[in-house]
Image (cartoon, rainbow, N blue to C red):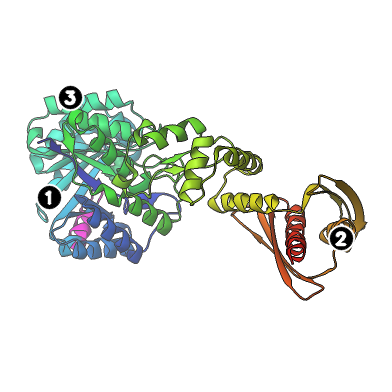
Amino acid sequence: MTRKISIFDTTLRDGEQSPGASMNTEEKLIIARQLIRMNVDVIEAGFPISSPGDFKSVAEIGRIAGDKCTVCGLTRAVDKDIEVAAEALKTAKRPRIHTGLGVSPSHLRDKLHLTEDEAIERAVHAVKLARSFVDDVEFYAEDAGRADQDFLCRIIEAAVKAGATVVNIPDTTGYNMPWAFGARIADLRERVDGIEDVTISVHTHNDLGMATALAIEAVRNGATQVECTINGLGERAGNTALEEVVMAIRMHGQELDAHTDIVTQELTRASKLVSSITGMTVQANKAIVGANAFAHSSGIHQDGVLKARDTYEIIDPADVGAGGSQIILSARSGHAALRHRMAELGFTFTDEEFEDIYQAFLEVADKKKEVYDEDLESIVHERERVNTAVWDLDALQVSCGFPLTPTATITLTNVDGETFTECAYGTGPVDAAYKAVDKIVAVANDLAEFSVKAVTRGIDALGEVTVRVTAENGEVYIGRGSDGDIIVSSTKAYLNALNRLISDQKSR
Ligand code: KIV
Ligand code: ZN
């Protein structure tokens, strides 16, 4: 069996420190329930002395956690902080006090104004006081990543002797390179007396984009607890992202000799929940939980994924609770991807038909960033309309604006291959185009209804126009047309209705 790595989630404490991400108790409880569902080992529920809201959150989360996970409250190495945290944690079945202080030269000198010996004294006092309230005390050596290593060994050893059950080695400023941070952990394991009896935890920040790498390197060197947040939320550039660490350990468990007990299928749900509650959107290309994490855009990748998913995916989307691999249709997509999606939508074509469809698809894709299912349906229907047409639209030019008179010049070809061009003016560009069509097609009708809607999302969406025309004999014919340009879709729709009218009346 590989080593169990405890997942300590601090979304509700360090994560909440992200500017703009503060949450009320109700919101924290919703997230805590999800963390429990995911089976995290420790929830850092808040910093009880910092506000009555944080106190209440720690107490409430302690109540709902029962014995499913440890609930932890943060303190400074200050008596009052520890007493208040102990009070808040009274509801918890498995309480932990997380206490500590800065240990780097700049924290000691500029922030705390303490000598090294004074800092050790304060750490020992804090751990002992915390232990007088609870059995589980975690000592953090803030800014350990920039501390003098000899001093770090001394203060950690003193904390262990004072009764700490967990020692937290944070790279508070995300300064380290992974190998250097890993070496610190290995060195602590070698030099600190009694460290083999406690859990070594790491808490890394993402200032150089290394947070996950730092945590994994620490695990490789003996850490057995990782502190992290959903979506990597946290101070400045954030903390280690829980979903990244969990999946990295899952994918490389054998070489790391490590596993976690996280229910990975809950990761996407957790990410969405935290994003919607905090209003902190997840970047589309975020590892594991970003909207594009399982989306394939280039033709070569799409072809590969359609042949075998693992050509371009190392994780099965189902393993993280994501919907599935996505093939994004765009101008970069090839035949294989389009044929695949069309088949999923229920459309099959001969090779010759498909070539036509593919060309029409490229025309739409050239105008749009992404081609959606509704666009594909429109392309197919448009092609059916053109194939049964008596009159075909060859060209359309309109000029309109304020205070111009809207005019349209139109070229149509009939089934016999004859081409006609006419121009007209109207009350608007659509009216002008319809009048130009009437001059060529010359079939009596009354335009009874005209409606336009966007087929898909975005400003570049295809516009679909539906018209109803009434023939002289009272029959009603519906016409539809779609295009990125709504004057063109309007004209196509009108022609489609007239084509139906003419075909119907001829067949009678
Ligand atoms: O980044 C840090 O060092 C912290 C400690 C309070 C654990 O958040
Ligand atoms: Zn932190």
Residue 385 position in % (x across, y down): 67, 54
The residues colored magenta run 75-88
For residue 438, the mark is 2
User: Does the segment drawn in magenta span residue 398?
Assistant: no
Q: Is residue 5 above or below residue 457?
A: above
State which tag comes first along the sequence, 2 or 1.
Answer: 1
For residue 8, the mark is none
Q: Quadrant of residue 208?
A: top left
Q: Element at badge 1?
A: loop
The front one of 257 and 319 is 319
* Amino acid carrying mark 2 in the image: Asp
For residue 136, the mark is 1
Q: Quadrant of the N terminus?
A: top left
Q: Is residue 301 above or below residue 227?
A: above
Query: Residue at image x 33%, y 25%?
Result: 177
Near mark 2 (Cα within 10 A), the count class, few <14, some 14-19 or many ≥20, is some
The front one of 488 and 108 is 488
Label 3, on which residue? 187
Q: Is residue 460 visible?
A: no
Q: Is residue 195 above or below residue 466?
A: above
User: Overall secondary structure of the magenta stretch?
Assistant: helix
- State how far apart marks 2 and 3 are (Cα): 87 Å
Q: Element at badge 3?
A: helix
Residue 484 position in % (x across, y down): 69, 50
Query: Residue at image x 72%, y 68%?
Result: 477
Near mark 3 (Cα within 10 A), the count class, few <14, some 14-19 or many ≥20, is some
State which tag comes first along the sequence, 2 or 3.
Answer: 3
* Amino acid carrying mark 3 in the image: Asp
State which tag comes first along the sequence, 3 or 1.
Answer: 1
Q: Is mark 2 within 8 Å of ligand 2?
A: no
Residue 311 position in % (x across, y down): 37, 31
